[in-house]
């Protein structure tokens, strides 16, 4: 959803019409999973994707029909020989898609509130109640903020629906994926994770520029201002030039923060880890050989950092893909970050860490 934030804002603040589609349920093999979004405009153009040629042409035709009627519906698409035969894209699964025209004042007001929640950053959950037995088959849409407070609704009014939905909300702190309960689809929009990279050298640069496309908000820190120039890091959120001892103690670290230490030397790595190991970050990773990491850990134990904090450090870094070049190392690190973020800390194929006594 966040990838459509600019288009949604433009839609909310104009008289433009469009159809906002959300994938709410899938069965079997499908090109996208619940939570995927797409905007369809009256001229047939689109923003976002629900999976490509396998189904999108039929979704567009259906959506534009619903735009004329100005009614939200749940449409079912069976991905068999009817879709994608010519392109070899037979998936075989089933997709249920919310098709919401944005045309009148109630639908536009709902999108306005959705955009406000997107801008607020902490995240929110959209709940789609889509029982086919509901009045006229029209789904009810509910927006809950990060504290599970109802912020907006659209569709048939039933006073019990918000309370019914709120009982099944999963806290956003758990970073849930889209989920279901009976005929309720829960579509979380999660707070973007901050990625703090200490060290702007070759590996730091490669990881940073890749992580932007992986939806991390990236901050790079280095004591060499020329190293973290806009030319080397054109798309990251923040570049901080300064000494580690001055920058890191005051840097804001939250339970959504990922910290990556890839400096140019042993001493810089050790100083960075000293200030990040036990700050409550979601993830702390340190590059280097096992021998170097063991030496750093031993020194930090002597400096008062707990063995428990150091045991939680991901070191050596990266999923084991036999990486050798800078680009391959960046891929292995980014794969580790994405898996940790998306799979509640689980990382397949990573090397065993350096075990210390607890």
Image (cartoon, rainbow, N blue to C red):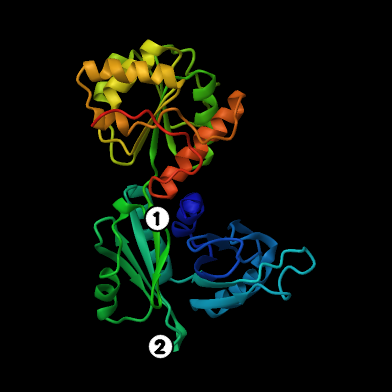
Is 231 on the left-hand or right-hand side of 352? right
Specify the quadrant of the image occupied by residue 67.
bottom right
Is 357 on the left-hand or right-hand side of 123? left
Q: Of label 1 and label 2, which has the lower sequence position?
A: 2
Q: Residue at x 38, y 17 (%)?
A: 269
* Residue 36 appears anywhere in the view: yes
Read off the residue under disc 2: 135
Q: Position of residue 312 (x, y in %)?
A: 32, 34
Alpha carbons under labels 1 and 2: distance apart: 28 Å
Read off the residue under disc 1: 189
Q: Secondary structure at mark 2?
A: helix
- Closer to the eye: label 1 or 2: 1
Residue density around tag 2, few if under 14, some if 14–19, many if 20 or more, within 10 Å = few
Residue 13 or residue 308, whichever sits in front: 308
In the image as oriented, which residue stretches furthest toward the right? 86
Label 1 close to label 2 by CB (< 8 Å):
no
User: How many marks can you see?
Assistant: 2
Is 99 on the left-hand or right-hand side of 265? right
Residue density around tag 1, few if under 14, some if 14–19, many if 20 or more, within 10 Å = many
Q: Position of residue 267 (x, y in %)?
A: 36, 11
Q: Position of residue 51 (x, y in %)?
A: 62, 60
Q: Which quarter shows the C terminus?
A: top left
Q: Is residue 106 above or below residue 257?
A: below
Q: Residue at x 53, y 40 (%)?
A: 213
Q: Is residue 41 above or below residue 58?
A: above
Q: Secondary structure at mark 1?
A: strand
Q: Is residue 137 above or below residue 176?
A: below
Q: Residue at x 39, y 20 (%)?
A: 293
Q: Is residue 248 above or below residue 313?
A: above
In the image as oriented, which residue stretches furthest toward the left? 304
Specify the quadrant of the image occupied by residue 54.
bottom right
């Amino acid at each position: 959803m966040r990838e459509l934030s600019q288009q949604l804002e433009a839609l909310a603040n104009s008289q433009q019409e469009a159809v906002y589609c959300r994938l709410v349920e899938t069965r079997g093999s499908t090109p996208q999973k619940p939570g995927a979004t797409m905007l369809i405009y009256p001229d047939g153009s689109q923003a976002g994707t629900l999976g490509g040629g396998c189904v999108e042409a039929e979704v567009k035709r259906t959506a534009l029909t619903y735009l004329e009627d100005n009614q939200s519906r749940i449409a079912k698409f069976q991905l068999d020989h009817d879709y994608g035969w010519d392109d070899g894209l037979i998936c075989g699964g089933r997709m249920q898609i919310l098709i919401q025209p944005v045309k009148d004042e109630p639908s536009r007001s709902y999108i306005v509130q959705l955009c406000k929640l997107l801008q607020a950053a902490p995240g929110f959950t959209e709940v789609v109640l889509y029982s086919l037995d509901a009045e006229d088959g029209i789904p009810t849409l509910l927006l809950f903020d990060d504290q599970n407070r109802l912020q907006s609704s659209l569709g048939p009014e039933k006073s019990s629906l918000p309370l019914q939905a709120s009982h099944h909300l999963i806290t956003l702190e758990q970073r849930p994926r889209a989920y279901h309960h009976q005929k309720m689809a829960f579509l979380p929009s999660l707070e973007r994770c901050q990625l703090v990279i200490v060290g702007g050298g070759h590996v730091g640069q490669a990881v940073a520029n890749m992580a932007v496309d992986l939806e991390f908000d990236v901050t790079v820190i280095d004591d060499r201002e020329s190293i973290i120039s806009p030319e080397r890091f054109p798309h990251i959120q923040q570049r901080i030039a300064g000494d580690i001892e001055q920058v890191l103690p005051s840097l804001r670290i939250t339970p959504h923060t990922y910290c990556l230490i890839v400096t140019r030397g042993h001493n810089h790595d050790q100083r960075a880890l000293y200030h990040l190991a036990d700050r409550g970050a979601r993830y702390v990773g340190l590059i280097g050989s096992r021998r170097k990491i063991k030496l750093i850990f031993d020194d930090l134990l002597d400096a008062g950092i707990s063995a428990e904090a150091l045991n939680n450090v991901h070191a050596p870094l990266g999923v084991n893909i036999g990486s050798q070049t800078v680009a391959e190392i960046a891929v292995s690190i980014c794969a580790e970050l994405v898996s940790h973020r998306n799979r509640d800390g689980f990382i397949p194929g990573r090397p065993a860490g350096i075990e210390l006594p607890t």
